[in-house]
Amino acid sequence: MLEPISKFYQSLDAVGRTTMITTPILLLAVGVLLVLERKIPYRKGLPFFREGLFVDLFWYTLVQSYFLQIVIFGFIIAPLAKHFGAQFHIMDHWPVVAQVAFFVVTHDFYIYWFHRFQHSSAFFWRTHEAHHSGKQVDWLAGSRSHVMEIIINQTIEFAPIILLGANPVVVPIKALIDAVWGMYIHANIDVKSGKLQYFINGPEMHLWHHADHEEVYYANFSTKFAVWDWLFGTAFLPQNRKPERWGLPYAFPKDYFSQHAFSVVRFDEKALAERSAAFRAYHGVRWRVLGWLGQRVPAARVLQGWEVPEEVHQTVPAPRPGGNPTAAPAVATESSRSAVTAAS
């Protein structure tokens, strides 16, 4: 049994071998987070089969990640590497640990500023709003990201690793760090890290970032290192208080393709389903399939996703310097998160 596995492992290149190690670590991290979400939940009563789980797991995590990896590495990074060759190979002799640390810190610094920019730009907010659309935030919620957001961020993340001549194993190692950290900061875990939260980001601050509270529309942009928020004045971490409402302050489609279409043309998903028989047929196909399956296999009913009742039905207001963001209609032409006043 072990001999074939050993031969297969030896036949792999360095990147393949590293991936063989990082993959089980990733799966172990998923298991640990799932257990912690059940044992010490930040938001009690949030089920595993929550609303949107199928979209996040199937479309965003499996399908989108697979195809975008091909696009980013095969059609963007590979041509860049071929064109520039070894011109920028300045990290050949750096230890792998130093290379990983360099790219983790520098990319996280970039992500802070780009993330902050997305919340202030009406145009780029449309490439980010899907990430905030889930009303039940858990370990998998971070996978919900617009196609263009992933292409931009992962190209800027991985292209320098190749162009600067870093060890190829840095790619799977950093991908593992990103995946685990991304799941961790979105996890429904009641973490109290004390003063460490001034440096290392976690659920304490990031779950607030996903709240539909006016006071956090422009706060907690950090991903891995919370120090960026504290240094640049965007940190928000109230004591002995948790968010009352999550998600967006306006209606947002629940379907993967509709979510991407919504970033281009605003529409009301329910109203469109009432007007258009074609859209109604498309919009309801998953529910009909799952309903049919649920009738025959009762255990499969959970796949439809359990809705968690919202106790607060409107954006939670909060005083802000210069006034509050303007209220958004049910379907906004531009996000109220980008409608910041000049004074703020």
Image: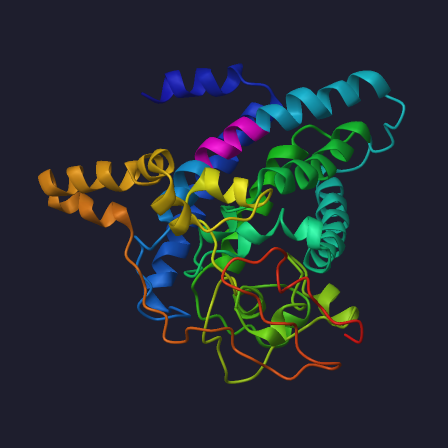
Place of residue 169 in the rendered image (x, y in percent of width and height, measured from the top left):
65, 31
Is any atom of residue 172 visible in this view? yes
Seen at 42% across and 48% down, the residue is 269
Q: Quadrant of residue 120?
A: bottom right
Does the magenta run of residues contain 61?
yes
Q: Quadrant of residue 226?
A: bottom right
Place of residue 304 in the rendered image (x, y in percent of width and height, measured from the top left):
26, 47
**In the rendered image, the vertical position of residue 81 relative to residue 220, given as above or below:** above
Seen at 79% across and 16% down, the residue is 82
Choose between 252 and 50: the one closer to the eye: 252
Choose between 89 and 260: the one closer to the eye: 260
Farthest-out residue, right: 87
Does the magenta run of residues contain 330?
no
Is any atom of residue 25 visible in this view? no
Seen at 39% across and 70% down, the residue is 43
Q: Quadrant of residue 138?
A: bottom left
Farthest-out residue, front: 275
Choose between 90 and 187: the one closer to the eye: 187
Please give left or right for residue 102 compared with residue 65 in the image: right
Please give left or right for residue 124 compared with residue 93 in the image: left
Quarter of the rendering occupied by the C terminus: bottom right
Quarter of the rendering occupied by the N terminus: top left
Rendered image coloring scheme: rainbow
**In the rendered image, the vertical position of residue 294 relative to residue 68, given as above or below:** below
Place of residue 250 in the rendered image (x, y in percent of width and height, measured from the top left):
51, 62
Place of residue 342 in the rendered image (x, y in percent of width and height, measured from the top left):
80, 71
User: Start and end of the magenta stretch?
Assistant: 60-68
Seen at 72% across and 70% down, the residue is 234
**In the rendered image, the vertical position of residue 308 relative to residue 77, given as above or below:** below
